[in-house]
Image (cartoon, grey):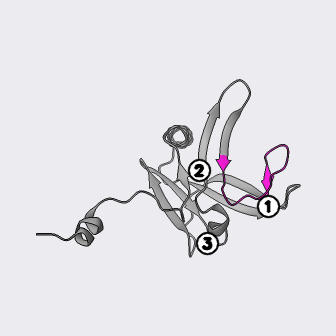
Amino acid sequence: MTTPAQTESTEAKAPTSTSVVLTDFAAQKVKALIEQEGRDDLRLRVAVQPGGCSGLRYQLFFDERSLDGDVVTDFGGVGVVVDRMSAPYLSGATIDFADRIDAQGFTIDNPNAGNSCACGDSFN
């Protein structure tokens, strides 16, 4: 006989609000881009850096490095890495990929962003 607490501890857990979420469509796009690079050691690194007209800007790039304090989450075989300094700013953010006539590229829906610039490249 198991108690509810035991059952909960054995269930697979979805990413928590302290992690970045990569949509299925975005994960497919990242996987395709990594395959084009011909490398299997790359992960998508998401970072927040000072800059932009609102104060902070996002950086998304492929990286093979592992840094102390990195938060790594797997989405269908795609590793997403957030450094420890950026993690609080990206907690609960969702990364998607838009492929429409009015928008193309990766988008970030960040509940921590108080304001963003008109072009959507930076936030505070």
Q: Amino acid at mark 1?
A: Asn
Q: Main secondary structure of the magenta part?
A: loop
Point 71% across, 55% down: residue: 59
- In the displayed orientation, state which residue is furthest to the left: 1
The reply to whether discs 1 and 2 touch (Cβ–Cβ < 8 Å) is no
Secondary element at tag 1: loop
Horizontal side of 18 relative to 13 (left or right) equals right
- Decide: marks 3, 2 in contact (CB < 8 A)? no
Residue 119, position as x, y percentages in the image: 83, 43
For marks 3 and 2 on the same chain, the one whose residue lies earlier in the sequence: 3
Which label number is shown at residue 84?
Answer: 3
Residue 35, image x and y in percent?
51, 40
The N terminus - image quarter:
bottom left
Q: Is label 2 in a helix, a strand or a loop?
A: strand
Q: Which residue is mark 2?
A: 94
Vertical side of 107 occupied by 101: above or below: above
The residue carrying pointer 2 sits among few (fewer than 14), some (14 to 19) or many (20 or more) residues within 10 Å by Cα, namely some
- Quick check: 67 left or right of 11? right
* Residue shown at the point (46%, 58%) measured from the top left: 15
Q: Residue 48: within the magenta?
A: no
Magenta stretch holds residue 113: yes
Residue 28, x across and y down, in percent: 50, 38
What residue is shown at x 19% (from left), y 71% (from top)? 3
Region in magenta: 108-124
Between residue 80 and residue 40, name the one nearer to us. 80
Q: Which mark is residue 124?
A: 1
How far across and down, in percent of the image, does residue 37 sit? 56, 42
